Image: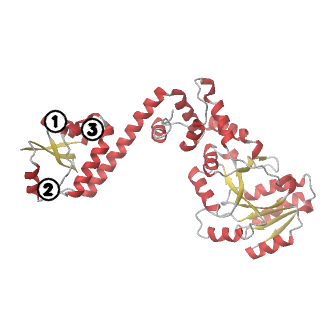
Amino acid sequence: MKIKRYLDKDMRHVLRRVREDQGPDAVILSNRRVEDGIEVIAALDYDEALVRHAIGVKPESDAEISSDALAEIAEDDAAIEPVAEVVSADLTRHPVEELSLKQMQGELSSMRGLLETQLSGLIWKDATRRFPLRAQILRNLARLGLAPDIANIIVDRLEPTGDIKNLWSAPLTTLAQTLPVVENDLLTTGGTVALIGPTGVGKTTTIAKIASRFAMNNWADDIALVSADSYRIGAKEHLRAFANIIGAKVYAASNFDELSETLVRLKDKKLVLIDTEGRSQRDRDLSSRLAAYGRNADRVRFYLTLSAATQEAALDETVREFSRVPLEGCIVTKIDEAAQLGCVMSALIRNDLPAAWFSDGQRIPEDLHGAARKKLWLVNQAVECMEASHPRVDERTMAEDYTKQSFANA
């Protein structure tokens, strides 16, 4: 039996040397990372029983890794993952002195991640060659900031076409149709509404816009504004400044019992708007406070206020946590401040949260729009944001995000 040690900078180079030196009958006995790279021990005329006796391991039905299999790795990156699993399993059963299992597992994990990246790049390159229009549509949607899972939904709903003119128009129309919205009669019939959400998303300003719009066709005395924010300094004064403009009254509720009592007193008002305190979606007290608000769910409609300038992951987290109360819908604010609107649109579609209003500025009440009639407007705003910010689309990122499912049914 001929045993030889090989050392090179990475596994690919080592395996090629084994293949070239010992041929297809060679067997890898061990491998490990050392200071200078990767060390592999390979054998020719391999006697399994002799080796196992030498290292004190009982015979088992273990899989051997021949040079043929390893040569495939050297030629095809996709083959390394199953081989790596065999190596990992073998090392787990037969720890060898000087070889750290954790070190080897880390190495295999790194190799697997590297190969997945390389493989996804090859798949994406091949897919873009075979389905160029679909690939370009995905790039366009990515530039809007749309998440990969939502972009796939949009593309899958498109009719097959070879017309390059539809690269923008058809996907944008489908995106607008996919956005969940809710018809809202609050501005005509009134009701009792509470705006909830994180701090700084524009709840107070939005309440002022709704109240001002309602006051155009109703008496100011029909409107009541309730400040349930006892945490933010000047919250009540801020709301009162808006109320003075339209002649409405402001009521304060420092706790939930006071809020319930205040709502009873205001039951004859046509429109009651409740300005709640801003809370982070990770606030430890959020669950208990939402539960307390939920005690008034029979008389209050809750709308989640979301800033379009928020990252997608934070939007998903916010929707998940604030959904502890029954949400009538949401209000998307700060559209004029967002660099990409695809994030908030992805969050709405993914969580099936209908939008009631869109807000794109500080003007009261002009910058408030009913979402049901403004879906295509929001999509056009997303295109304008993209054109203004010039986001880059990295092909490597596209490969990692889209190769797993984007072209499966193409």
Left-right relation of 71 to 226: left
Q: CA distance from mark 3 to mark 2?
A: 27 Å
One can see residue 255 in this view? no
Colour scheme of this structure image? secondary structure
Q: Check disc 1: other Cα within 10 Å, few if <14, some if 14-19, many if 20+.
A: some
- The mark lying in front, picked from 2 and 1, is 2
- Which label sits on residue 59? 2
How many numbered marks, from 0 up?
3
Q: Nearer the viewer, residue 148 or 241?
A: 148
Q: Write down the residue under mark 1.
A: 24
Image point 54% across, 27% down: which residue?
A: 133
Q: Which of the marked residues, 2 or 1, is nearer the chain's N terminus? A: 1
Q: CA distance from mark 2 to mark 1?
A: 24 Å
Instruction: Say if 167 sits above or below 271 in the image.
Output: above
Left-right relation of 100 to 246: left
- Residue 266 x %, y %: 86, 69
